[in-house]
Image (spheres, rainbow, N blue to C red):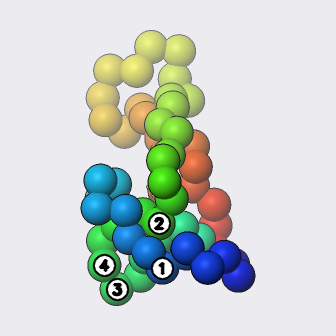
Amino acid sequence: MGKDKLNVPNSSIRCSVQQCEYHCGDVEYCSLDSIHVGTHEAYPTEKQCVDCDSFRLK
Ligand code: SF4
């Protein structure tokens, strides 16, 4: 925490993960300029196979 930009929503990145440090809280957006999306699977086939690698626990 402690970043000035933390609560400025990036309207290009919708997100509902309230537990993330970068989530905007009242609105369903991420506050980062960009995020990295990755996978924890060798061969991802479903949406639950992919992750927001920029997630950081509050
Ligand atoms: S970093 Fe990822 S999980 Fe966190 S608020 Fe942004 S999009 Fe959501």
In space, the residues marked 4 and 1 are separated at their CA atoms by: 9 Å
State the residue position of label 1: 7
State the residue position of label 4: 27
Asked if marks 2 and 1 touch (Cβ < 8 Å), the reply is yes
Q: Quadrant of the C terminus?
A: bottom right
In space, the residues marked 4 and 3 are separated at their CA atoms by: 4 Å
Asked if marks 4 and 3 touch (Cβ < 8 Å), the reply is yes
Which three-letter amino acid code belongs to the residue tagged 3?
A: Asp
Residue depicted at 50% across the width and 46% down the height: 35
Give the x, y percent position of residue 12: 29, 53
Mark number for residue 19?
A: none
State the residue position of label 2: 31
State the residue position of label 3: 26
Look at the numbered disc 3 and give the secondary structure of its residue: loop
Which three-letter amino acid code belongs to the residue tagged 4?
A: Val
Look at the numbered disc 2 and give the secondary structure of its residue: loop
Could you tell which of marks 2 and 3 lies nearer the N-terminus?
Answer: 3
